[in-house]
Amino acid sequence: MSDRGGPLQESASFGPIVSSRRDRLSLAVAQAPLWLIAIFLLAIWAGYFILTRQNFRQAFEFILIGLSATISTTLWSYSMALILGLIAGLGRISRNVIIKNLATLYVEIIRGIPILVLIFYIALVAVPSVVDSLQALGFWLISRDISFLGEPLSLLSNQAISMNTRAVIALSVTYGAFLAEIFRAGIQSIGRGQMEAARSLGMSYGEAMRYIILPQAIRNVLPALGNDFVAMVKDSSLVSVLAVRDITQVARLYAGRTFRFREAYTTLAVLYLTMTLVLSLIVRMIERRYERNG
């Protein structure tokens, strides 16, 4: 009797194990980012299609010339936007009425105007106006015998400022307002008790903000900062309206010269999709790492 019951008991004991494995497998399939896999497969297929078709390969090699301009514009603009955003974010929570209102005015004006309009205005109106004002200040300083300050300013000219530089300034000023709100929210997410505790230990307001509040705030808003960087990679295509030779402008030139619109803009779309997808994965990896360490 015991020998006959052995296999039945063994199969019964394996039943829960098999069902639990099936449950884990079904859960893994349900939680798998199928949309991400689909995008990866689409990018791989598009890359293979581009590299194996002569017309697409020629478009890819031509458009790739503008990749360095796209990357440099994005990196410089985002670096400057981080500084502007941090300053404006601190200004938004300042107890000084003038500083707070100036920071709020900057944020609200920038956020209320489309990015494309801001790029035109900053590059073609604001920058020349600032240069002319500095040049006039330089001549005034020279007339007051302050030549060591006046001469460098008087030599400034609008022709010396390239469209690439103007594009970087425009993107920096624009994204600085968006990053200011991110920094403000991150700082305000830290409890007031930590500032009070730091001040009770003898720290000044600046020291407490630098060593206690800001490190925690930046850690909290790191995913949002990463998402804005990905957004800037895409919005950097707008600087092509200033004739900056990024991949968008180069693709437009190629399409206008060869009339191969399908090849040019398909390649351009794949390039942007690849860059944003890779950057989004990096941002998610950093976010998960901070969640585990936190």
Image (tube, rainbow, N blue to C red):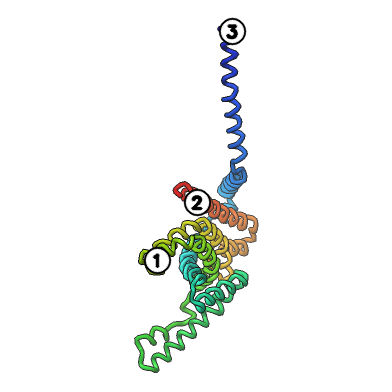
Q: Secondary structure at mark 1?
A: helix
> Which residue lies at the image location 51% right of the left edge and 73% below the top edge?
166
Q: Which residue has dot 1 on it?
A: 199
Where is residue 143? Give x, y as percent: 40, 94
Q: Is residue 198 left or right of residue 49?
A: left
Q: Position of residue 127 (x, y in %)?
A: 51, 78
Up-down relation of residue 105 to residue 1 (above or below) = below
Quadrant where the image shows the N terminus? top right
- Of tags 3 and 2, the one toward the viewer is 3
Within 10 Å of the Cα at label 3, are there few (<14), some (14-19), or many (20+) other Cα atoms?
Answer: few
Horizontal side, residue 68 vs residue 17: left or right? left
Q: Give residue 4's mark.
A: 3
Q: At 64% across and 61% down in the image, what residue appears?
A: 259
Instruction: Please name the residue that numbered disc 2 is placed on.
Output: 287
Circle 1 packing at 10 Å, graded few (<14), some (14-19), many (20+), is: some
| Amino acid at circle 3 | Arg
Q: How many marks are shown on the rendered structure?
A: 3
Q: Is residue 68 left or right of residue 268?
A: left
- Residue 257 in sight: yes
Q: Which one is earlier in the sequence, the residue at label 3 or at label 2?
A: 3
Q: CA distance from mark 1 to mark 3?
A: 78 Å
State which tag comes first along the sequence, 2 or 1: 1
Indicate the amino acid at tag 2.
Glu
- Residue located farthest toward the top when viewing the structure as drawn: 1
Q: Amino acid at mark 1?
A: Arg
Q: Nearer the viewer, mark 2 or mark 1?
A: 1
